[in-house]
Amino acid sequence: MKKKYTSLLFDLFNTVALWDTNKIPIYKIGSKERHSTLGELKLVLADRLPRLNFDDFHDAFDAVNRELTEEKSTNRKEVSSRQRFLRILRKLDIQPSLSVSNLANDLSQTHMQLLIGAAFVPAEHRNLIRILRSTHKLGIVSNFDHAESAKSILVRDGVTSYFDQIIISEEVGWRKPDSRIFDLAVQSTEDNKENILFIGDSIADDIIGASEFGLDVAWVNPKGHSLNPDMPKPTYEIKSILELKDLLSLKVKNVPH
């Protein structure tokens, strides 16, 4: 017998919203080409800091990203996109000043505009969320370092109004799998943990984080990855959120917009 849930909490990226990486320009790094925002960042820097060697920026970019990945996995605190770029510029010995602060903001905005253009909520996801809204309380809980951009994607694709709460790590300071962001999300539902299903794709952030907090988890696993034996086992495994209709035994038809 399937469990009855009254609240659903969703991860955002690779769960509700997907990525079309073809919309991110191709940038050549050495002999390799990959989709990257670096090409557009290079144009910004060429205009603002024409004497800067972009290879030096690229090295600092990679170094700061590695540092932040390690730091976030340890302290589970979010660092904003703007602060990340400011840290990169400081690593290049560009002294903090109003102009450098503005440059960090411009780099962040350029980076985010490309990501916004590549992210989208598919029409079938929108339709499902609209149906779910009539039967459940809905919320978003996402790790992302620029809340304004994350929310703008939901606004543009017409699903913001379906969610009772949208919690982005940049705004609250804590990242999944930290219990504090899950606690905020659960409080926002005004529901009991046993009545809440968390839906997400990340093993570390979503499966481990939500499970450790005491929530049932639906793991979005489109490529059929396997879990290590020592990992918490999700309550359910689905290829996309579209399978929630069957998992939740939805029978709603012709729900008005």
Image (tube, rainbow, N blue to C red):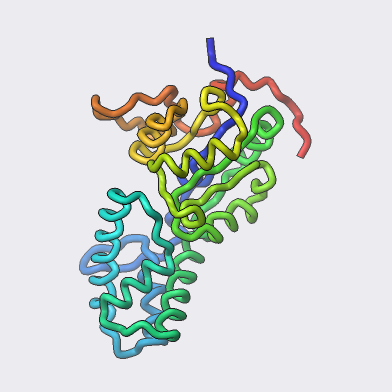
Query: Foreground residue, 198 or 27?
Result: 198
Residue 152 percent across, percent down from the top left = 59, 58
Residue reaching furthest to the top: 1
**Which residue is more in the foreground, 55 or 21?**
55
Q: Position of residue 187 (x, y in %)?
A: 56, 37
- In which quadrant of the rendered image does the C terminus lie? top right
At 43% from the left edge and 79% from the top edge, which residue is drawn?
101
The furthest residue to the bottom: 51
Left or right: where does residue 54 sit relative to residue 45? Answer: left
Query: Is residue 241 left or right of 72 when viewed as pictured?
Result: right
| Residue 167 drawn above or below residue 211 | below
**What residue is rendered at 40% in x and 68% in y?**
83
Q: Residue furthest left?
A: 31
Q: How many marks?
A: 0
- Going 32% across and 84% down the picture, which residue do you hit? 95
Q: Work out whether 222 lies above or below 59.
A: above
Is residue 219 at least partly visible in the picture?
yes
Rendered view: 87 above or below 226: below
Asked whether, in this view, residue 31 is left or right of residue 84, the answer is left
Residue 240 screen position, x and y as percent: 49, 33
Q: Nearer the viewer, residue 229 or 174?
A: 174
Res 61 quadrant in image? bottom left
Q: Is residue 9 above or below residue 245?
A: below
Q: Is residue 20 visible?
A: no
- The residue depicted at 58 percent of the width and 55 percent of the height is 151
Q: Position of residue 138 (x, y in %)?
A: 61, 36
Left or right, 193 with reference to 203: right
